Image (spheres, grey):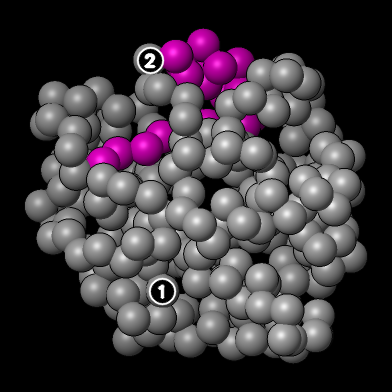
Amino acid sequence: MKQLVAYITAGYPDVNFSVDLALALREAGADILELGVPFSDPVADGPVIEAANLLALKSGFKTDMLFEIAKQVAPKITTYFMGYFNPFYHKGVDYFASKARELGVSGFIIPDLPFEEARSYKHLLEGMGLYLVDFIAPTHTSERIAKIAKDSLGFIYLVAYAGITGSGKDEDLKGLVASIKTHNSQTPVFVGFGVDENSAREKAKHADGVIVGSAFVKILLNENLTKTQKVDKIALLARNIKEMINE
């Protein structure tokens, strides 16, 4: 069965809401949760997730809130900390790693940490039983795909196109996924960037699953909805996408 990875912005609008939303996503069929660490300059993300990041920071997000959410949800759904390198570097990657292991978090997704620079951190994390997710993009050469894919663990984040999240562009990923699988047939490949109810089926066709972020966060930002309505709408969307990718 193809898997659904769900991204949410941690701590927005508050810790209890994030916990409720995470558990509702699990019940709706999400297999993996990305807990987004709010940051002021999320360079790989589009305006939707950027807005949620800024609102979370404005409302007083602190790292301890991330850990409190993870404490409650990581035992119930496979959870990754997803964020930009600055917060991890500022607090210390070893500090985050210790907290992740303590809380049952599976690993880290850091989109602005280049593959070469990530090697030392990857070894540190793997030594603690944690994963550092690798990214592969359509712009990578076959040599680079082989280099990245062969040692990837946890899952491979396949960027659907060169751009920012939420753009919804189309790419033919069949050949790229096949290339990755020739070098690593064990680690699942999940397609992210621009995945929503309109594109999920097509993007999941040749991969092991999809990563959905902006489509969920867009509902999260809708202030015409109550908190309960937001949770219900996001859960329904997750359920529909999970069904679509497995039809």
Q: How many labels does the image show?
A: 2
Residue 173 lies within the magenta run: no
- Residue at x-position 54% and y-position 83%: 237
Q: First in sequence: mark 1 or mark 2?
A: 2
- The image shows residue 58 at horizontal and vertical percentages of 80, 49
As drawn, the label of residue 196 is: 1
Three-letter amino acid code at disc 2?
Answer: Glu
The answer to which image quadrant residue 170 occupies is: bottom left
- The image shows residue 5 at horizontal and vertical percentages of 51, 61
SS at circle 2:
helix
Magenta stretch in the rendered image: 117-137
Observer-nearest of 11 and 208: 11
Residue 135 lies within the magenta run: yes
Q: Distance between the residues labelled 1 and 2?
A: 31 Å
Q: Name the residue under label 2.
A: 116
Three-letter amino acid code at disc 1?
Answer: Asp
SS at circle 1:
loop
